[in-house]
Image (spheres, coloured by chain):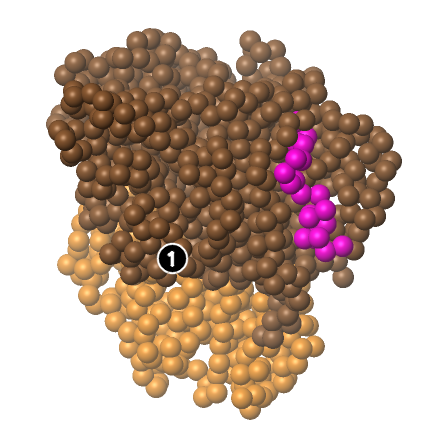
Amino acid sequence: MKKFSGTEPKAQHKGASDGATAVQERETTKLVGQSIPRVDAIDKVLGKTQYPGDLSRPDMVFMKVLLARRPHARIKKIDSSATLATPGVMAVFTASDVPCNEYGLIEPDQPVLCGDVVRYIGDKVALVIAQNEHAAIIGRERLVVDYEDLPAITDPRRALDSSALILHAAKKTNLLAQRRIRKGNIESGFTKADVIVESEYVTPHQEHAYLQPEAGLAYLDEQGRVVIETAAQWSHDDRHQIAHALGLPQDQVRVIYTYGGGAFGGKEDVSIQIVLALAAWKLRKPVKLIWDRDESIIGHHKRHPYIIKAKWGATRDGKLTAIQMDLLSDAGAYASSSREVLNNATAMCTGPYECENVWVDSRAVYTNNPTCGAFRGFGAPQVEFAAEMQMNKLAEALDMDSVELRKKNLWRNGSIQATGAPVPEPVGVIKVLEAAARAAAWPVKKSSSKRLETKKRGFGVACGFKNVGYGFGFDEKCTVTLELHGRSEIEKVVVRAGASDAGQGAHTILTQFVADALDVPLEKIQLVTGDTSEADPVGSCSASRLAFMLGQAVRGAAELAKEKWRTQSERPVKATYRFKPRPTTPLDPETGRGDPAISYCYAAQIAEVEVDTATGQVTVLKLISAHDVGKAVNPQQLIGQIEGGAAQGLGWATVEHFVMKDGFVMTPNFTLYLIPTVLDVPEIMNTVVLEDPDPQGPQGARGVGEMGLIPAAPALVAAVHDATGVWFDQLPLTPERVLKGLQSVP
Amino acid sequence: MRNFEHITPPDLESAVDLLSERGTKSIAGGTDLLPEMKSRLRSPRRLVNLKALEELRYLKHNARKGFQIGALTTLAEIESNELIREKIPILAQAASVAASPQLRNMGTIGGNLCQSVRCWYYRAPEFKCWLKGGDTCYAIEGENKFHAILESSPCCAVHPSDLAPALMALGASVHITGTDEEGTVSLEEFFVRPKASNRQMTILGANELITEVQVPMLDGDSSGIYLKAMDRKVWAFALVSVAVQVSWDKERVKGARIVLGGVAPIPWRVPAAEEIVRDQAITEEIATSASEAALEGAQPLRDNGYKIALAKALVKRALMTLAERAKK
């Protein structure tokens, strides 16, 4: 197994303009494994790159969306006469203008425009299109909607009460999904336990807070197709949902992605795409829309808050005997991907630990809070926070080192998951924990700050894992077409792969794979990624899957293309390959048995914090992350992904407090919803990368996009406990919470 | 935001005259007003642009009058001014932790003292709260972790300024110019608790402007400190802040002014705490009892009880830090 430390590629990269390798031991002829500069970097730093908000077309008009801004109400009447009389206003569209008024990533339970009922503040009610943006805003102000407010369910714990109003009448219940795991005998597991730790954890909503709010431009092309230019995470699925709502065949809809300014799962659901398409289709004119920050925060889905009851038992010598978990997820008003997030949460809530007796009950419920969906980690951060907290509490209860306790229980080759399936091998979680512990010189002795005796320091550790790809029986595939142009020599390679690059570097990785697979230099490679009418469907940019799937699809397509190039005279050569990873299965509804994941990636993190016990402020001084990535395709990007993920995880754990009250978002802007600044992330981020090849991944690569975020919160909370002696079971650890917690100890 | 007329008056007198008309607001840095206009909290028909009034952009200091700071002086200028850093560093400190560098480049000292509260109910168009002319302060029964622990009725928002507590600790005054009259008032008089007849935190009339901030000469041996606790390291409003300015007779306190931010609708001076440290050498015991006295009578709401502990900690830390420095 090869290994390098996170600081190396960075230092190397400074002098890497001559193409020097990031890691010295690598061979130099291959690009995979090298920190080549981003293929999109030059245009971005020159300001040439067009993001969705930059797009324009001659005679385009502007749209504004009227959001409900009330959590639950019946629409009695919409009066648009004053709007239509506003100078510059061209049209108002409401529910009756939508051919098939429904959409949703998995299940179409969300109206494009609400006709009868609004179920959360971000529900769309009407569209105002005008000659200019200002007129659209004025026109929107003049819309008069007569609402009858309904009681709102805003506490997920009350959503299943018999008195609770049903949000979706056709469903007859607010229970959106439930899962179970029944493995072994939970009672005998607890009987065998010498120590039992029981806690309730509360994890909050999280806002994606991407740089670029939702925006786009829609128009009709010369063939009469409706084109939507925007940037999100899954162009082909957007096309599917747009076509469904507009009642059009898919080939009448074209989605074109520009580069995006961040996504983190927040652009996996459709936000503005359908309404833009609808307006352009109806008006036969280019229509542009840019959401303000508060529209973005109110209008797109959030990370699910989870309430997690955990009861874990272990023997005196530290072997887990029983894990019982009860998960309650606030799905918000619509399904989005709540079921799939619940799948993940259910399968992963035991942490990467062996335990013979597991009992899990999990539910996702509809409420009148903002809809929740994909967010980096997809259910794993919430449940693994609980799992890692339980392990750290067990270590305390057993008076055992928390790394040692983990090593007694962590998965290894041959381990069986809670769902009964073997863990896909090789299983690298013990190695990452050992690597992190080594880098931190664990166990670390506390040294209190000399400056002020109220400042206490502490260290904490957590492990994490995340599945690569969708899993749970989803028919996952990734298709790539390669076109080889030239006669005797390959002069140009056109890569047709509908891969979204949200800023993480997917296109650079794709280019590296193609260059190596065909042995062509980067300059000959031309990517066609944005346009659904030109690029093959690769699936979403999410689930830590894109590099993994693209790499394998490119490998297959390149083999076919090379074969044709050798054996056929026809030019250009064109080869399409559809990669399908090994099949997975859904969880059995009663027992939870199943083989949920193609593969897993692993990480361990150790945080050092300083807690000002007088003011409740927590400072993260240092974060060590060790990751098994299988293969570092582009080490510099990889470190960026890991450190960025860690910063987002620390943000979730400390400063990001999404406050809801009675269905209203109290924090709809960045003055109130704080995200970490550079001063809030640790001065020292030491990333250790292990490369234990995954036989399923391209050149051994696993996924990495989500992993950096997952252990950060439990590592931080463990460090705060080490510093103060207090466990914090609710995130985030704002000064308010910390001071309240500390007041309960002498 | 709605359309508005933008007028640049030739001089202060015309500016004040223009302000007498209904629907008119003055604009300097615009860092508070423009977001309010974008979110429709205010929709003035006319803006009177003060930025061109060069006569309000100055920073003077002399041994008799102390500092005279023109209202258009930006926070960035205050933060970096050598004389301020040397003679009244507490003000430079307060300016340096306010907002972000971009906002400090635009925001003015006059505007900073007149800014609106950051209460999330006040800022949300969905809630017509008492301060906006409604009947209810939603925060009293609602989400109130950022709200007042002292004087929480009829509005429990807190004054967000970092400069105001520091200036009040320095004994500063503001010069106000209106259509008919002008005069100078201390900051204690300038900031008032909102009431039904005046739903704002200052006495400033619609057609009046702050034209100058005056900081009197300090005693020969004087030192000050501004401490601010935030939810993140920078670029946030104070959860609680404290400004302490002490005049010394060697290591003994001759007099002190202690002002809290983030705890009341206005910057909150705490004479009871000042009394405790007067004529004392500051020990941990004295600092502790001053911090207790400072929060005497605090009445927390559901979520903001932590502010009591936080404010006490900051008062104590400020006093102890000043005492240590005085020993050196």
Image side of residue A287 versus residue A365, left or right: left
Question: Vertical placement of A315 versus B9: above or below?
Answer: above
Question: Vertical placement of A566 versus B280: above or below?
Answer: above
Residue A314 seen in the current view = yes
From the image, tell me which residue sits under label 1: A24
Which chain did the renderer colour orange? Answer: B
Q: A644 and A740: which one is in front?
A: A644
Question: Residue at 68% across / 56% down in the picture?
Answer: A721
> Mark 1 belongs to which amino acid?
Gln
Which chain did the renderer colour brown? Answer: A
Classify residue A253 by image quadrant.
top left
Please provide percent x and percent y for residue A707: 51, 42
Question: Residue at 34% across / 64% down in the picture?
Answer: B75
Q: Which residues are magenta?
A: A400-419
Q: Chain of mark 1?
A: A
Classify residue B177 by image quadrant.
bottom left
Question: Vertical placement of B54 versus A489: above or below?
Answer: below
Please provide percent x and percent y for residue A342: 59, 27
